[in-house]
């Protein structure tokens, strides 16, 4: 074995690290800004949804969300669904914890330097999807030293199609940065994808910014810069 060969249990090491990162992130407050634009065939904005939420703690240290102002919604074709908001909370920021690992098949796809970090490239896809479940299907870039997820690209699945309606989801990229000097938190998610509805294609642009990370009870605030 060469020194730079990936460990045989890479997926388990990533899941263990992801579980630690999730537990650490749960001790932080932060602001989450979601912007969704629907674009016309020339790339011009036709409508927009925008909301800002602070993820905070109650005096009893209970996790809660606080909507800042009212959401702005001028979308004409797209409708925000429960699955969209669930993906923002659960799929796009964090994905492969130990409690979730058994749901996924993983395969090493090589190595690549991503954002200045030497990474293993790990493909993950759900083994099975039952009704009401949401999963990630795509690629993870994992740093070769600490097994932090540096970047993820893929899609929240499944796409939902019935005889009466369609609920489709864009391919996205989530970028992470080290927040506390040890754990890599999501700071930015973006997507620019054309959703193929039966009524015709609809281009969507998604932006989610995670900012103002602050450990609960601490005074200092970390605002990452891209």
Image (spheres, rainbow, N blue to C red):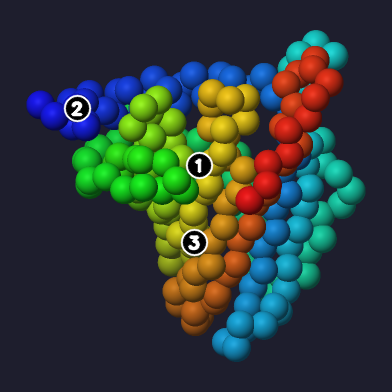
Q: CA distance from mark 2 to mark 3?
A: 38 Å
- Check disc 3 and report its element: helix, strand or loop: loop
Say which label, 2 or 1, has the lower sequence index.
2
- Check disc 1 and report its element: helix, strand or loop: helix
Q: CA distance from mark 1 to mark 3?
A: 12 Å
How many marks on residues? 3
Say which label, 1 or 3, has the lower sequence index.
1
Vertical placement of residue 168 versus 86, above or below: below
Where, quadrant-wise, is the N terminus in this rendering?
A: top left
Label 2 vs label 1, nearer the camera: 2
> With 105 as the anchor, is 87 left or right in this view?
right
The dot on residue 3 is 2
- Check disc 2 and report its element: helix, strand or loop: loop
Q: Residue at x 83, y 21 (%)?
A: 219
For label 3, the crowd category at 10 Å Cα-Cα, with few meaning under 14, some 14 to 19 and many 20 or more, is many
Q: Residue at x 22, y 46 (%)?
A: 110
Q: What residue would you read off at disc 3?
A: 170
> Label 1 near label 2: C-beta < 8 Å?
no
Question: Where residue 184 sits: x, y (%)?
Answer: 53, 32
Say which label, 2 or 3, has the lower sequence index.
2
> With 109 as the anchor, is 79 left or right in this view?
right
Q: Nearer the viewer, residue 121 or 171?
A: 121
């Amino acid at each position: 074995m060469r020194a730079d060969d990936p460990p045989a249990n890479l997926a388990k090491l990533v899941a263990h690290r992801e579980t630690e990162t999730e537990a650490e992130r749960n001790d932080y407050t932060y602001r989450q800004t979601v912007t969704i634009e629907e674009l016309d065939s020339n790339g011009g904005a036709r409508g927009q949804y925008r909301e800002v939420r602070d993820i905070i703690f109650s005096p009893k240290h209970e996790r809660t969300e606080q909507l800042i102002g009212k959401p702005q919604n001028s979308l004409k074709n797209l409708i925000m669904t429960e699955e969209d908001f669930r993906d923002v909370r659960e799929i796009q920021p964090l994905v492969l914890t130990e409690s979730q690992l058994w749901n996924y098949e993983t395969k090493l796809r090589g190595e690549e330097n991503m954002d200045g970090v030497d990474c293993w490239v790990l493909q993950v896809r759900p083994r099975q999807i039952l009704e009401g479940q949401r999963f990630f299907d795509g690629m993870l870039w994992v740093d070769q030293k600490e097994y932090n997820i540096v970047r993820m690209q893929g899609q929240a699945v499944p796409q939902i199609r019935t005889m009466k309606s369609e609920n489709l989801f864009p391919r996205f990229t989530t970028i992470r940065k080290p927040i506390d000097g040890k754990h890599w938190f999501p700071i930015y998610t973006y997507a620019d994808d054309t959703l193929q509805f039966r009524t015709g294609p609809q281009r969507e642009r998604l932006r989610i910014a995670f900012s103002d990370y602050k450990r609960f009870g601490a005074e200092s605030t970390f605002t990452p810069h891209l």
